[in-house]
Image (cartoon, rainbow, N blue to C red):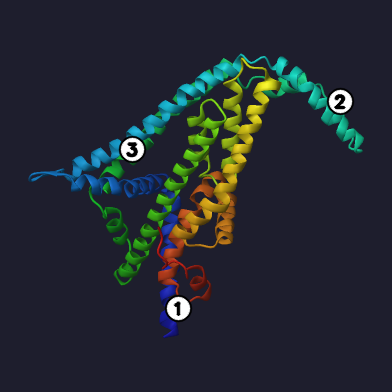
Amino acid sequence: MQINALSRYFIIALITLIMGAIIYRFSEIISYVIIAWVISLMGSPIMRFLKKISIGKFVIPNSVAAALTLGAFFFLIAGILALFIPVFFTQAMNLSEVDYKSIAVALDEPFQNILQWLKSHGIPVEFINLEELVSSLTKGWFEPALVTDILTEFFSTASSFVVAIASILFIAFFFIQEQGMFLSFLLTLIPDNYVDQTQNAIQESIRILSRYFNGLLLQMLLITIYMLVMLSIFGIKNALIIAFFAALMNLIPYLGPIFGAAFAVLITLSSNLDLSFYTEVWPQLVTVVLIFGSMQMLDNYILQPFIFSKSVLAHPLEIFVVILIGANLAGITGMVLAIPIYTILRSFAKIFFEKFKIVRLMTKNMNESGF
């Protein structure tokens, strides 16, 4: 009996190694397939809704419903680009015309007071010319030439980007049209003895990942609404763009809020160049930072615990360690993908390695119902 168990685990380990080698060799193509599969998961509610529509005996064909579902994604992405791109170029041009000397002059008095305070407390600091500091930090970053360079770089890589997008959409179309195709394809790679177990593991992964993605969408919606309301109350310009970008960046654990806050400060600064910096712009920047701080408290103590506990069904410390591992392996991309990948691994571990105590401990909450 023990020999059979060892043989079973050996076969599973061998299959895992082979699959890992295949994934490494064809990582780009496999990434297209996985992204297309995620799109099909997100588009499945739209597909089911369209299939319920009927006029008499006429029912929307699967191919048409799949095309309409992809069309919804296309218009969503196009809308986001239409929202951000004009603002980006407008603000970049505005920042290229900023009088940084006047900003430095306005901030020089409080800056020198800070230096004097540091000296009075025994902290040695050298004299710093704020005007030269601001000029050196900003020189070259907001010049029109930089925008031209960014466009040149973008169009030089546009061909490969277009190929990737076209490939993903083509694969996603068939995944949406034929529900279960991805699962059927995976099962063809599995020995017959393990088909049922693998199917259960994949279905468990799909169930939890669907709830996780729905939770992220809910999180983005709530953060966007909260930020939009708060920024609008205090009269901050471009409130919608700042709010949506903050919600989008918040998907990146830990570093995302910093990116979002930096973007908000930059947009607020460039949108008020005609105002006095020290008396009018500075209070707005402080307000934006405080609103971001309150949003982070809302997200960290209410939204994230609710989403993770109801979707991923894992302990917060467990999630934290997983994200750190993802960051160590693949940077920001690893941080974003850490939880979905961990969810899949937990689902397979629950099915194939349930005899191990550590697996039972890590998967004991996976049978709980989510939202």
Q: Is residue 347 above or below residue 144?
A: below
Quadrant holding the C terminus? bottom left
> Which badge, 3 or 1, comes first in the chain's sequence?
1
Q: Amino acid at mark 1?
A: Leu
Q: Earlier in the sequence, mark 2 or mark 1?
A: 1
Q: Is residue 32 visible?
A: yes
Image spot of residue 90 (x, y percent)? 51, 19
Task: Name the residue: 51% across, 62% down.
Answer: 314
Residue at horizontal 72 percent and vertical 15 percent from the top: 102
The one nearer the camera, 238 or 122, is: 238
Please give the residue where the numbered disc 2 appears in the rendered image: 127
Q: Mark 2 touching mark 1, by CB under 8 A? A: no
Indicate the position of residue 121 as horizontal and vertical percent values. 90, 38
Residue 297 image position (x, y, % from top left): 60, 47
Disc with the residue nearer the chain's start (2 vs 3):
3
Q: Residues within 10 Å of mark 3 (few under 14, many from 20)?
A: some
Task: Tell me what residue is drawn at x 46 percent, y 55 percent.
Answer: 341
Query: According to the image, label 1 marks what residue?
Result: 6
- Which residue: 54% across, 25% down? 237
